[in-house]
Amino acid sequence: MRTAPTGQVLYDTTATRASAVVLRAYSTSFGLGTRLLGGRARRDIEAVYALVRLADEVVDTYRGPDAGAELDELEEQVARALRTGYSTNVVVHAFARTARRTGIGHAEIDPFFASMR
């Protein structure tokens, strides 16, 4: 009998699943394409896609006067999660786990956020 994950394992799993939900909700064809990949590669792509989608939503969908501040906060969350390996934002958490494991760092992330402004 398998026991259900708890603690950090449960949170990591939930964050990974949340990223998959974001990808499937926003991109049917891309989501289907990622299913052809192996588990780890698929999960990594889902995590990166979900973060990019989240930033894109701040830029393209949110129309509040503090949109710039929202993007700044997201960038700060990502930087903090890269340092600590943890975020209370499940999309950022999944991305940070992927980034730390695959070597995605500020050389890639900073230009991305700059391009969103």
Image (cartoon, grey):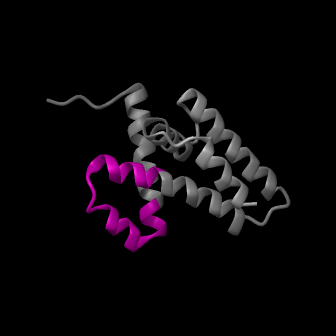
Tally of numbered tags: 0
Residue 53 in the figure: left or right of residue 98: right
Q: Most extreme residue toward the right, as rendered? A: 65
Q: Main secondary structure of the magenta part?
A: helix
Is residue 61 among the parts visible in the rendering? no
Instruction: Name the one closer to the observer, 78 or 6.
Output: 78
Residue 32 in the figure: left or right of residue 18: left
Q: Most extreme residue toward the bottom, as rendered? A: 29
* In the image, residue 55 lies in the stretch drawn in magenta: no
Coordinates of residue 69 in the picture (x, y in percent): 80, 50
Q: Residue at x 57, y 57 (%)?
A: 52
Instruction: Name the one closer to the observer, 15 or 96.
Output: 96
Coordinates of residue 12 in the picture (x, y in percent): 42, 36
Q: Residue at x 49, y 57 (%)?
A: 49
Coordinates of residue 17 in the picture (x, y in percent): 40, 48
Q: Quadrant of the N terminus?
A: top left
Note whether 106 is above or below 54 in the view shown. Answer: above
Coordinates of residue 74 in the picture (x, y in percent): 68, 47
Note whether 38 is above or below 81 in the view shown. Answer: below
In which quadrant of the rendered view does residue 20 lie?
Answer: bottom left
Is residue 107 among the parts visible in the rendering? yes
Note whether 98 is above or below 85 in the view shown. Answer: below
Note whether 117 is above or below 16 in the view shown. Answer: below
Residue 5 in the figure: left or right of residue 14: left
| Magenta region | 23-47
Q: Quadrant of the C terminus?
A: bottom right
Residue 26 in the figure: left or right of residue 61: left
Q: Most extreme residue toward the front, as rendered? A: 107
